[in-house]
Amino acid sequence: MEWKYHSPTFLSDKYLSPEESLSSYYPYRNFSYDLTRYIKPKIIVELGTHLGVSHFSFCQAVMDENLPTKCYGIDHWKGDAHSGLYDEDIFLLVKNISDTEFPNISNLVRNSFDEALSTFEDGTIDILLIDGYHTFESVKHDFDTWLPKISENGIILLHDIVVRHLDFGVYQLWDDLKKKYPCIEFNFATGLGVVFPNFFNENQVSMINNQAELQISYQNSQNLN
């Protein structure tokens, strides 16, 4: 399969203020969009959805590629010590986007990550984005408990892998994972890690890695300008 670059229009943007749209996941949503259209997953799950910038990038790709994929955003929509606490308006905003733009694609699961585990059978999730509470203990627990749910050719995305302030510990888990699995690293902005826990087709890993390197090079050139 050939990787294709797209210039999508993200329907969710019209619901979000400019500040909300520019979340820390913003630099990676085109990659997430292209990745979805490239591997054509059956199930995408996101742990930690907040305003849905990443969730709706997956949904947009599914819609535009006309895939039968189901996208799940799991969150209790209360916030935490890292994101800050927020009120019911955040969930209502995300639900409105989900119901209005992606009614047959987006599934919002208002639950804890552990409680949502039983929703999915082992070996069924093709893309898992881990973006919940960011202490080392929490993110390692999320990775370990959800790993059995990943499909044979599944991919795990880890957000905020270069953040080292406060008690963020995703970078510690990332350092461990790079020793165990084939990985790709986006080291700009807050960082995004791509993990291939079951090490599928080497050509596909190489293809995705090439696209990541091109995007990193482009991002670095933009930062210099």
Image (cartoon, rainbow, N blue to C red):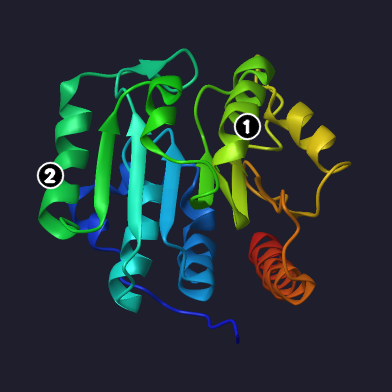
**Res 96 label:** 2
The structure residue drawn at horizontal position 43% and vertical position 45%, both measured from the top left corner, is 45
**Residue 19 visible:** no
Q: How far apart are marks 1 and 2 (CA)?
A: 29 Å
Depth check: 64 or 154 in front? 154
Give how far across and how far down residue 6 sits, in percent: 45, 79
The structure residue drawn at horizontal position 28% and vertical position 70%, both measured from the top left corner, is 63
Horizontal arrangement in the rendering, residue 54 relative to residue 203 (left or right): left
**Residue 96 visible:** yes
Horizontal arrangement in the rendering, residue 55 relative to residue 101 (left or right): right
Amino acid bearing label 2: Asn
The image quadrant where one finds the C terminus is bottom right
**Res 4 label:** none
Decide: few, some or many residues near mark 2? Use Cα within 10 Å; few <14, some 14-19, many ≥20: some
**Vertical arrangement, residue 224 with respect to residue 83, above or below:** below
Horizontal arrangement in the rendering, residue 57 relative to residue 157 (left or right): left
Q: Name the residue under label 1.
A: 143
Give how far across and how far down residue 205 sits, in percent: 73, 68
Eye-nearest disc, 1 or 2: 1
| Residue 64 placement: quadrant | bottom left
The image quadrant where one finds the N terminus is bottom right
